[in-house]
Image (cartoon, helix red, strand yellow):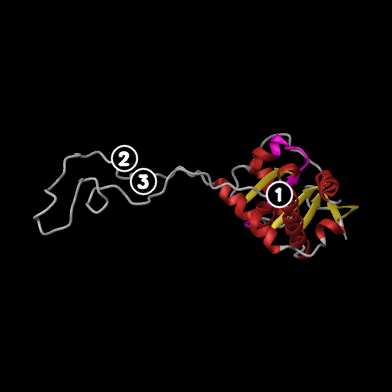
């Protein structure tokens, strides 16, 4: 499969670039995608949640009533969970939500996601470019050239071009990343996937084995 290479103004340069069939034309593995996206989202969680249990409550340790003769259940502490203001039973504690996935499985997930985008014809290729200064309007013009205004877009480069990144930073729904940091979640989350010419060549070398 071949794609036309455009310049940053959306004009066809006349060049073509091949998409590796082993990356962009495989049978997607949905379960691998599910696991990789699940891990990505789990890693975003801080896990700092904490509720006060009875040991964390400030209160008297005095026995609040006698053991027998009251006609009601025994009660040994005002900090008991059965009383208002007492500690919480089995409340959340700080924890890490991250879990391990094999590199090969994550690679299968990325390839599957790229194959989905290829079938949707959501992949575009652009010549490597940079901006003279960090201006949001320049990146908006770039998105307009690829009909990506108002839609989620992901621009993938070989190395992070500072002015391009800064120009995109204030725009909602758009992201600039390098090919080494490309994740399954980012691929699936984008309506438009735009690769720089060199980043696509690097991706072919990384995954096309």
Which label's residue is closer to the chain start, 1 or 2? 2
The residue at the point 62 percent across, 42 percent down is: 169
Q: Is residue 155 magenta?
A: yes
Q: Position of residue 171 (x, y in %)?
A: 60, 47
Q: Position of residue 96 (x, y in %)?
A: 52, 44
Whether residue 79 sits left or right of residue 110 in the image: it is left
Which label's residue is closer to the chain start, 1 or 3? 3
Q: Position of residue 71 (x, y in %)?
A: 11, 59
Task: For the residues labelled 1 and 2, say whether their Cβ atoms are less than 8 Å apart.
Answer: no
- Mark 1 nearby-residue class (10 Å; few <14, some 14–19, many ≥20): few
Q: Which label belongs to residue 51? A: 3
Camera-nearest residue between 62 and 110: 62
Q: Position of residue 148 (x, y in %)?
A: 69, 56
Q: Which residues are magenta?
A: 150-164
Give the residue pinned by disc 1: 102
Per the image, label 3 sits on a secondary structure element best described as loop
Camera-nearest residue between 25 and 48: 48
Camera-nearest residue between 205 and 145: 205
Per the image, label 1 sits on a secondary structure element best described as loop
Whether residue 196 sits left or right of residue 153 in the image: it is right
Query: Which quadrant of the view contains residue 18?
Result: bottom right
Q: Is residue 158 magenta?
A: yes
Give the residue pinned by disc 2: 56
CA distance separating discs 2 and 3: 9 Å
- Mark 3 nearby-residue class (10 Å; few <14, some 14–19, many ≥20): some
The residue at the point 66 percent across, 52 percent down is: 186
Camera-nearest residue between 161 and 108: 108
CA distance separating discs 1 and 2: 39 Å
């Amino acid at each position: 499969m071949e794609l036309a290479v455009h310049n940053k103004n959306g004009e066809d340069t006349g060049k073509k670039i091949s998409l590796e069939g082993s990356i962009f034309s495989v049978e997607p593995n949905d379960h691998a995608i599910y696991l990789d996206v699940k891990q990505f989202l789990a890693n975003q969680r801080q896990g700092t949640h904490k509720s006060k249990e009875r040991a964390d409550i400030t209160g008297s340790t005095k026995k609040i009533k006698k053991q027998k003769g009251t006609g009601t259940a025994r009660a040994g502490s005002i900090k008991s969970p059965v009383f208002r203001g007492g500690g919480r039973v089995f409340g959340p504690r700080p924890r890490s939500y991250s879990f391990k996935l094999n590199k090969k499985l994550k690679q299968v997930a990325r390839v599957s996601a790229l194959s989905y985008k290829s079938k949707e014809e959501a992949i575009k290729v652009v010549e490597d470019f940079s901006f003279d200064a960090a201006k949001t309007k320049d990146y908006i013009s770039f998105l307009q050239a690829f009909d990506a205004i108002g839609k989620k877009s992901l621009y993938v480069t070989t190395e992070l071009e500072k002015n391009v990144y800064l120009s995109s930073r204030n725009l909602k729904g758009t992201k600039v990343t390098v090919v080494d940091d490309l994740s399954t979640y980012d691929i699936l989350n984008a309506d438009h996937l735009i690769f720089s010419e060199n980043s696509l060549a690097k991706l072919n070398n990384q995954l096309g084995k």
